[in-house]
Image (cartoon, rainbow, N blue to C red):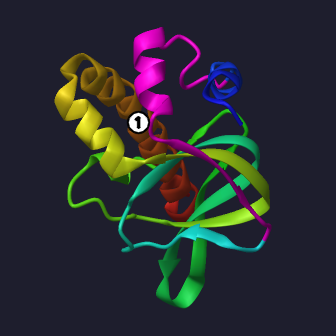
Amino acid sequence: MEKRDLSEILRHHPFVNDLSEHHLHILISCVSNVRFTEGGYIFHEGEDATKFYLIREGKVALEIQSGEKGAIRVQTIGEGEVLGWSWIVSPYKWHYDACVIDDVRAFAFDGKCLRTKCEADHDFGYEMIKRFSQVLEQNLKAARYQVMDVYGR
């Protein structure tokens, strides 16, 4: 797929639909297309967080392992959403398991490439921080709701 075609497809994802052309070009320099099949894992808690994903199709469950209870689903990520923020926060380790619950097509972004681009272009870096702050907020809300569900009255 040519870069121009990729930018047209990527532009429709809610995470980047209002990104400047310059910043979109930077982002595209670190992207690849990926697919994952139902039942597999994209990453596991504690592994190096080397990427983040913009989900185009499918669903991914974020899970934490809880000894006796096994896997607890904290959040489900689907089409139009972002999977992964740990690539941008040192020490760059995943905090969840990401289990594919419906075949996934996604854009995968290389974290090291993007961190380098953020350092070189602080305006781009600030834009990424603003956007990933929203992703972090969504994850915190999901975790809060899960705790309320598990431990609520």
The residue lying at 65 percent from left, 25 percent from top is 13
**Which quadrant does the C terminus fall into?**
bottom right
Look at label 1 and name its amino acid: Glu
The residue lying at 53 percent from left, 90 percent from top is 68
Where is residue 46? Give x, y as percent.
36, 74
Q: State the extent of the magenta-drawn residues as a range.
A: 13-38
Where is residue 3? Give x, y as percent.
61, 28
Q: Would you place residue 39 above or below residue 135 in this image?
A: below
Residue 3 in the magenta stretch? The answer is no
Where is residue 123? Give x, y as percent.
24, 16
Q: Which residue is mark 1?
A: 137
Q: Nearer the viewer, residue 3 or 109?
A: 3
The picture quadrant where one finds residue 94 is bottom left
Q: Nearer the viewer, residue 32 or 107?
A: 32
The picture quadrant where one finds residue 125 is top left
Query: Is 28 situated left or right of 55 in this image?
Result: left
Where is residue 93? Give x, y as percent.
32, 65
Query: Is 124 situated left or right of 5 in this image?
Result: left
> How would you rate the neighbour count of disc 1 (Cα within 10 Å): few for under 14, some for 14-19, many for 20 or more?
few
Residue 33 in the magenta stretch? The answer is yes
The residue tagged with tag 1: helix, strand or loop? helix
